[in-house]
Image: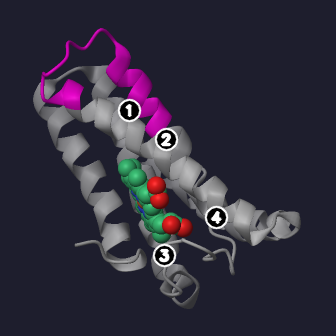
Amino acid sequence: MVRKLISISTAVAVTMGCSMHAAADTTPEDAADYRVAIMTTLRGHIGASSMTVRGLVEDRGQLVNHAQGLANSAMELGNIFPEGSNVGESEALPLIWEEPEEFAAAIVKVQDASLEFVEAAENGDAEVIGGAFRNLGMACRGCHDRFRVAHD
Ligand code: HEC
């Protein structure tokens, strides 16, 4: 299963270059707004997942849905950083386009972690779910710490 997950992520990383050319008609402002919209879906799903994982709300089967939502949005990450789209209020650092391989690796990491979280949520073992959730959170943070404007 792990090998399957890795090959899916590799395929996404390989198609990333083509997708960026396809976005040539999108204005930088729209690209930045779309990126924030995708990140906001990630925030919603991760917040709801966190409350479920911590047992603050009962898991009525929604955890799998949130995990799938996270994985779906994570699969879009390779398309939402066209060069030159760090305009206006954007907190995307130029390093994203200066270190494209490292940035692509950060995307693959979160994609793999999100797929593992889906698998854990489907399996239902609390310890495995907790571990997969923490890994996913670290993958988000790993990219933010390096490629996003620092927050206090
Ligand atoms: C590969 C890098 C990368 C990964 C992985 C990543 N992010 Fe982000 N995220 C960014 C960057 C860069 C920005 C700043 C975007 C901008 O302002 O143009 C951002 C912005 C955000 C924002 C702020 C949106 C706003 O209102 O301005 C949230 C919330 C967010 N990310 C959540 C997440 C979550 C949750 C995950 C993990 C599931 C995640 N991100 C994974 C790079 C990443």
Residue range highlighted in magenta: 51-70
Q: CA distance from mark 1 to mark 4?
A: 28 Å
From the viewer's side, name the closer residue of 59 and 111.
59
Left/right of residue 5 with respect to residue 56 in the rendered view = right
Q: Which residue is mark 3?
A: 103
Q: Which residue is mark 1?
A: 118
Point out the tag, 2 or 4, that comes first from the N-terminus. 4
From the viewer's side, name the closer residue of 103 and 152.
152
Q: Is the CB of mark 1 within 8 Å of ligand 1?
A: no
From the viewer's side, name the closer residue of 2 and 35.
35
Point out the tag, 2 or 1, that comes first from the N-terminus. 2
Q: Nearer the viewer, mark 2 or mark 3?
A: 2
Point out the tag, 1 or 4, that comes first from the N-terminus. 4
Q: Which residue is mark 4?
A: 32
Q: Is the CB of mark 4 within 8 Å of ligand 1?
A: yes
Q: Residue furthest bottom?
A: 98
Q: Nearer the viewer, mark 2 or mark 1?
A: 2
Q: Is residue 51 above or below residue 114?
A: above
Q: Are marks 2 and 3 in contact (CB under 8 Å)?
A: no
Q: Which residue is mark 2?
A: 41
Q: Where does ligand 1 appear, by image quarter?
A: bottom left
Q: Indicate whether residue 61 is drawn in magenta.
A: yes
Quarter holding the C terminus is bottom left
